[in-house]
Amino acid sequence: MQIGHNRKMTGAACLADMLKGYGVTHVFHVPAVLRTTYAEMERRTDIKRLHVHGEKAAAYMADGYARASGKPGICMAQVIGALNLAAGLRDAFLAHSPVIAMTGGREPKNKFRKVYQEVDDVPAFEPVTKFNATVDDVARFPDMVRQAFRSAVTGCPGPVHLQFRGNEGQIDAEEADMEPLVEPQFSRVPAFRPAPDERSLRAALQILQDAARPVIVAGGGVRASGAAAELVALAEALQIPVATSLNGKDSIPADHPLSVGVCGTYSRESANRVVNGADLVCFIGTETGGMTTHFWAVPKIGTPAIQIDIEPDALGRNYPLAACVNGDAKVTLARMAKNADPASAAKRKAWVGEAQKVCGEWRDKYAPALNSDAVPIRPERLCHELTRHLPDDAIVVVDTGHAGMWMGGMFDLTSPRQSYMRSAGHLGWAFPAGLGAKCACPERPVVTFTGDAGFWYHIAEIETAARWNIDAVTVVNNNGGGNQSKRGFDRVYGGKQTDRARELWTFRQTNFARIAEDMGALGLRVEDAAAFPAALAQALAAGRPAIIDVVTDIEALAPVAVS
Ligand SMILES: Cc1ncc(C[n+]2csc(CCOP(=O)(O)OP(=O)(O)O)c2C)c(N)n1
Ligand SMILES: [Mg+2]
């Protein structure tokens, strides 16, 4: 890193050099924005510039890239596509994913004159970003780009937005004396590992050790911190069952004897039962939001709780705390494990046995569905086939709605090397996010799970995947409708839907395998569960994008959460 070595250069050359310096390998965009920068990226870097079919998909790809790698994902749009891009940042914002959005925008000499395509986009980015700013003078490229990376990856990570002057960000063609200085520390999450203060750490540990029936609820902060091993070590040392949020599902493999599953709304019954049977809940890296706590019923407010978080303002937001620790999850958990008194574990033997019994009861209850040979295929069986056959270093990317419920509850991660990323609420997120994840981690298998309604959103991106040979595998749970809506419509129709009622949530039967083939990907259709493992193996070995269209039962409804 050099400081004070300015030289005359264009904003485009500066931005290209800085993106390279921060380790960016891909940018996702719809043309045309920062055209001169794209030409400089070609001349000066190996960065791949993927032009895709929609700005929202570009944002989701950048988000998937960011969650898979911990490095900021970059997406771009010209002024007319800016709000489409902003819409795509919302999931990244909810999931605390470091995405940097760059758009073209306001030119002072044209403002308020009805210039072509212009509205003031900046306010629309406000609710979905940590930092939302305009770059109006080319000399500001270096410090503004540094601030974008710094803001995206520090504290609780999240999206940022820079709007560059000019409809297409033509400011990048202007020159100034600049230095394309980068700060490598801010090129990925976590930028810092703030250590907890000793007093609060010891107080929390004491309360945890004294509890007879404690449970840990681990969230996305554990995955952002890379603290899974430390979490498991502490749980083992003190013999404490571990539930996770959906965002924290890959914090502990499902076959670990202390793992009880995902708790909350899109959850597994065993996790909710154990959390509600606990005498102390230890929240780690979770916002304690509605989905993780089943709208604050799991655990009930008033249950004794302690909390560890990198964001001080998360501590105690929803649950009054007996103690709290402000710090990075990995550092905090490692210190707690080091200071833990393993002798205290003996008193939790009965509780751990009880938690394991609850998990066994869940397995027995769902074994028939998980192993069902029914045609059309049961989604539980599809999840179970994924549990059994996914590679042990797979990145699993999951859509929301029923997809989130099925995979959150019925699918097991079986190796600490597997990763799990899920939509924080937006239907259609997973397919493009899976493509972005594969761009970030080309050496790892990426398997996306989505419903058919979710897949329809960004189906055009099959062409992008084929054009760039992004060999992710996408499994479509194809039941011919947006089936999660069935239950809600059943309710308003008094349990008896009319044919016209089904117009509100069913689709034409569609063969996605055939569409995939036409668009240049491998397309496989599975109508019998026994054929799924061979299809998955073929897709993983294809060396090109693959869509597995699995025909499933439209009457299958995921179990609702218990509390
Ligand atoms: C952007 C967005 N719009 C609407 C919804 C509401 N929603 C949740 S699930 C769902 C239908 C899901 O259908 P599909 O993906 O086919 O899965 P299935 O329930 O059929 O398994 C809808 C419309 C949402 N989550 N996100
Ligand atoms: Mg469906």
Image (cartoon, grey):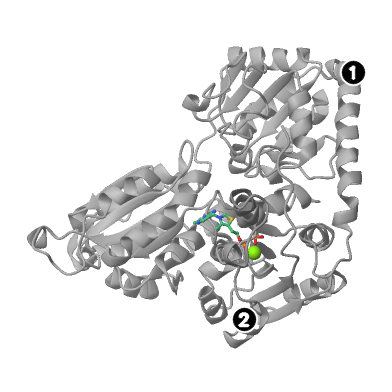
Q: Is residue 487 above or below residue 453?
A: above
Q: Residues within 10 Å of mark 2 (few under 14, many from 20)?
A: many
- Pick whichever, 488 or 61, lies toward us: 488
| Residue with the mark numbered 2 | 516
Q: Identify the secondary structure beneath mark 1.
A: helix
Give the number of the disc on residue 346. 1
- Pick whichever, 522 or 144, lies toward us: 522
Q: Identify the secondary structure beneath mark 2.
A: helix
Question: Residue flagged by tag 2: what amino acid is it?
Answer: Ala
Residue 477 visible in the current orientation: yes
Question: Residue flagged by tag 1: what amino acid is it?
Answer: Ala
Please name the residue shown 88% across and 45% down the image. 365
Please name the residue shown 37% across and 75% down the image. 43
Q: Do labels 1 and 2 touch, CB within 8 Å?
A: no
> How far across and down, in percent of the image, does residue 314 sit?
51, 27
| Figure quadrant of residue 392 | bottom right
Q: Is residue 512 above or below residue 16?
A: below
> How far across and down, in percent of the image, does residue 435 sit?
57, 67
Disc 1 to disc 2, C-alpha distance: 56 Å
Q: Image quadrant for the C terminus?
A: top right
Please name the residue shown 73% across and 36% down the image. 562
All told, the count of numbered labels is: 2
